[in-house]
Amino acid sequence: MAAQKLTKGRFVQIIIMLTLLIVAFFWRTITYQDVIKVDCEGKNTCSFKVNETEFTAKFEAEMLSISTQNSGWTIHEANLTQEKPMTWQIAFKHKQQISLTNNAQEETYRLEITNK
């Protein structure tokens, strides 16, 4: 490849692309949220904590029932079949990802529950 002179337009293009890549890197680093993994393998009932709040997961047939004593939480899930205050039922098969939102702090936690 023959060497070419670096023009002003090409230099600006390189600086813009470099800036976009740096911004994308920092944005992803700042907004990254780890997934909380809960392994309930071989159990019909298991407990886990999210942000100092205890939750109980019960497995019945192909349903997952999640309950807590704290009323400040909501679950966002497409397969949510029943929702009562502090209790949610979700269609479940071996592995499920759900989002728990703490309404008081406006924070969302991603949770992955497995049961084989």
Image: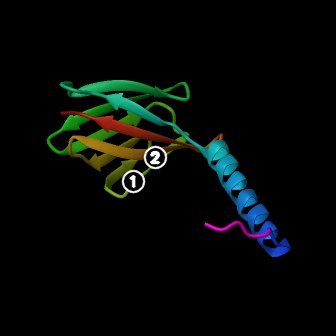
| Residue 8 in the image, given as x and y percentages of width and height | 85, 72
Q: Which residue in the protein does label 1 denote?
A: 77
| Residue 55 in the image, given as x and y percentages of width and height | 41, 30
In this view, the residue in front, 73 or 115, is: 115
Tell me the amino acid under the disc marked 1.
Glu
Q: How is the image coloured?
A: rainbow
114 with respect to 29 (left or right): left
Q: In the image, is residue 4 part of the stretch drawn in magenta?
A: yes
Tell me the amino acid under the disc marked 2.
Ser
Q: Secondary structure at mark 1?
A: loop
| Residue 95 in the image, given as x and y percentages of width and height | 27, 41
110 with respect to 26 (left or right): left
**Residue at the spot 69% in from the left edge and 47% down from the top edge:** 26
In this view, the residue in front, 42 or 61, is: 42
Q: Secondary structure at mark 2?
A: strand
Please provide the residue range marked out in magenta: 1-5
In this view, the residue in front, 24 or 55, is: 24
Question: In the orientation shown, which residue stands out farthest toward the bottom?
Answer: 9
Relative to 57, does residue 2 appear above or below in the rendering? Answer: below
Relative to 109, does residue 22 appear above or below in the rendering? Answer: below
Question: In the orientation shown, which residue stands out farthest toward the left?
Answer: 61
7 with respect to 92 (left or right): right
Query: Residue 78 falls in which quadrant of the image?
Result: bottom left
The 10 Å Cα crowd at callout 2, few under 14, some 14 to 19, many 20 or more, is some
Circles 2, 1 touching at the beta carbon (< 8 Å): yes
Q: Which residue in the protein does label 2 denote?
A: 99
The quarter of the picture where the C terminus appears is top left
Q: Between marks 2 and 1, how big is the CA–CA gap?
A: 7 Å
Q: In the image, is residue 79 part of the stretch drawn in magenta?
A: no
30 with respect to 112 (left or right): right
Mark closer to the chain start, 2 or 1: 1
**Residue at the spot 22% in from the left edge and 27% down from the top edge:** 41
